[in-house]
Image (cartoon, rainbow, N blue to C red):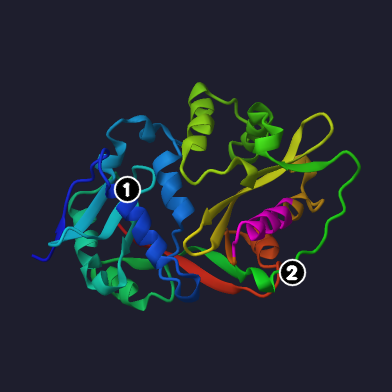
Amino acid sequence: MWVQEVNFRNNSEDFKHMCRLIVELNNPKELGHHWTLGQLIDWRWGIWNDAKLDPNFFEKNCRPFYNYLGDLVGFAISESGTNRFMIAFRKQYRSFRKLAIQSVLQRPFGTGPFEISTIESDTHFIQQLEEAGFSATSRGETMYLYAIEDAVLKEVTLADGLTIEGMDRFQDLGRQMELKRYSFHGGEEISPEHVFAYHYVRNSPLYDASMDLVLHDQTGRCLSGCEGFIDYDNALMQIERVCTQKAFEGRGYARAVINECIRQGALRGVRYFSITAWNDLTHHLYSSFGQSTAIPIRVYSRA
């Protein structure tokens, strides 16, 4: 067969080939996938759950597909070692996505129902999923895609003593971890594993400390933050990890750090940026930076 599934190899070029494929699919003028380069890099460097401490995690949770000529044409991965998975294939090979679906169904990544997200405009993939027994759920997200030239940055006046800086200048990772502990972990105590994960992710090839922004007061307490991941080949930036301490919500701090992220991205040649919303609050904010293209993403499930 022209396309074959192979085992993922940690010490190989497999992951770089996967990155090239996502870059190919992320042309902002004809977006072919909802996963960005930042998300894929974070899959490899974001050790955000205990499953990823397994040295064999990536071999177990990735299925690359190569053609006879040795070119990567697609892959299926589980982000967290569960049966919630993602499939990406080159457009010319999209008919082979059914092989990846069958591979996951026959050799599950984990337990529980199978779930996969896709952009709603990919009707071909939706048909393949429905033929395999998947059906749409009510769950989903919306990616908002902007052209820098269309961005409208509503200014936020910050009180005296508040400053927005990149982690290249601020450098107090402990204070930043406090912000993220309250924003992403419900205030639970930071474990040694969390500390390791926060340090490890900074080794990612896409991490740029100057694009890892925090809004802090004069004491160094971090009140809000966000991060920009830049796909330089597509001049496309994904804005991620937007967070504000609950006691300081509603003051425009998230908008202020996003504004600064957009400005810094533009200085680095970014022509497009995306940000993904999942609830009323994030939809209201993330859709408010000027004219955008809304890209609905739907979760499909099979028991």
Q: Secondary structure at mark 2?
A: loop
Coordinates of residue 269 in the picture (x, y in percent) = 60, 61
Residue type at mark 2?
Answer: Val
Which quarter of the figure is the C terminus placed in?
bottom left
Between discs 2 and 1, the one toward the N terminus: 1
The Cα–Cα distance between marks 2 and 1, rounded to whole angstroms, is 36 Å
Asked if one can make out residue 212 in the rendered structure from this viewpoint, the answer is yes
Secondary structure character of the magenta stretch overall: helix
Coordinates of residue 48 in the picture (x, y in percent) = 47, 37
Observer-nearest of 132 and 41 = 41
Coordinates of residue 244 in the picture (x, y in percent) = 71, 44
243 displayed left or right of 128: right
Residue at numbered disc 2 = 152
Neighbourhood count class around disc 2 (C-alpha, 10 Å): few under 14, some 14–19, many 20 upward: few
Residue 96 position (above or below residue 210): below
- Residue stretch rendered in magenta on the structure: 257-270
